[in-house]
Amino acid sequence: MAEIKAHEFEGFLERSARNWRLFLVYGPDRGLVSERAALIAGKTGVSLDDPFSLIKLDIADLQRDQGRLLNEAGSIGLFGGDKLIWIRGASNEKYLVDSLQLLSDKVPEATAVIIEAGDLKKGSLLRKTVEAARNIVAIPCYADDVRALNSLIDSELTAAGLGITPAARQALLELIGGDRIASRNELRKLALYCRNKATIEEHHVAEIIGDASAISIDDAVDAVLSGDTSSFLHAMQKITSSKTAVFLVIQACLKQFQLLDAMKIEMEEKRVPAAQVMQTLGRHLHFRRKPIIEQALRTWSAEAVARESNRLQSAILQTRKRASLEDSIALQTLLSTTLQSARR
């Protein structure tokens, strides 16, 4: 495996990315994962506006047809040429790992595969598989540190022809950083606000920038599980105002219900309490979230969890079929799930 550190990514992108065919981009910063995956896609040489060359799949697509990745990788395009398979929303699905292992054993010559995943803990199935392979590139994406944020500020403001005072820069650093796409959007909003000015002052930052460091999809998911409608709507307002895709929330919510499903099965098969199963299947969760998940295990029945997982999965399919209604479908479904949690 080749692992690309944060400071190595730009060099890798310019010099080496085109020489690889299999990529895993993962980490807690979903915006950075998405951004880097898009940059890699641009280096594959595949036309990203050609539906015969670019195949975008969500993990739910593979769940319905577990051999689809291999089928797509082995098929020949209608007009020939290179092909890119771009998978989003992966975690540790065994069917994905098995397909990736087979592709690693015989890397397709004219096909590139980019997999976007969330925060994979060390030793997790997908990450362990990639680490054992010699021909897959792993690109971890963690929240931007001060150095990376300063670089992001400089690149965006220089492109807009703007300078910034030290006080304004410090104020910015305290307000961005939770998600790369959210941070970039906040900077572009600031640049537009200060158009025709030479220098950004501290008061400009205070007037227009929201707290992008506080944006968290997990907050929205936790509000759904807690049945806290007010917190859910507040979290969604922050997410939408930062231009973060609402689809990411419903996708994260589905993963959480799939975890609850696995936990409920474990509880029933081994006849163990929620607290004990949290120590095994829930050990990777952030300590702040564990009480919320444990409470959901007590209040949701196994049948209800499975039913809600199917409903969320169906909603994700609808967002793919009706892209223009993606936000409405996601918000309506998530709000309904929040109300279900509140009733329980």
Image: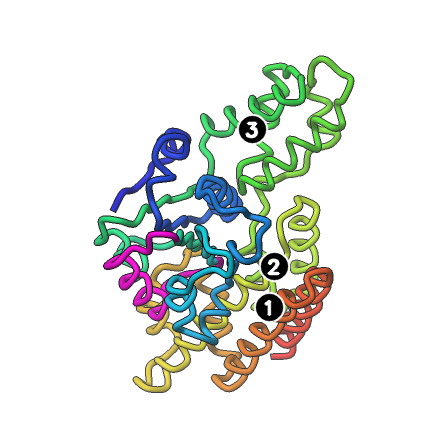
Which label number is shown at residue 247?
2
Q: Secondary structure at mark 1?
A: helix
Residue 173 tag number:
3
Q: Earlier in the sequence, mark 2 or mark 1?
A: 2
Residue found at x 30% / y 49%: 136
Q: Secondary structure at mark 2?
A: helix
- Which circle marks residue 316 in the picture? 1
- Residue 237, how many percent across, how many down? 70, 52
Asked if marks 2 and 1 touch (Cβ < 8 Å), the reply is: yes
Q: Amino acid at mark 3?
A: Leu
Q: Amino acid at mark 2?
A: Phe
**Label 3 with label 2: CB-CB less than 8 Å:** no
Compare residues 259 and 185 and report the one nearer the observer: 185
* Start-end of magenta stretch: 88-110
Could you tell me the amino acid type at mark 1?
A: Ile
Image quadrant where residue 269 sits: bottom left
Q: Indicate which disc, 3 or 1, sits on the residue closer to the N terminus.
A: 3
From the image, state whether disc 3 or disc 1 is nearer to you: 1
Q: Position of residue 12 (x, y in %)?
A: 36, 33
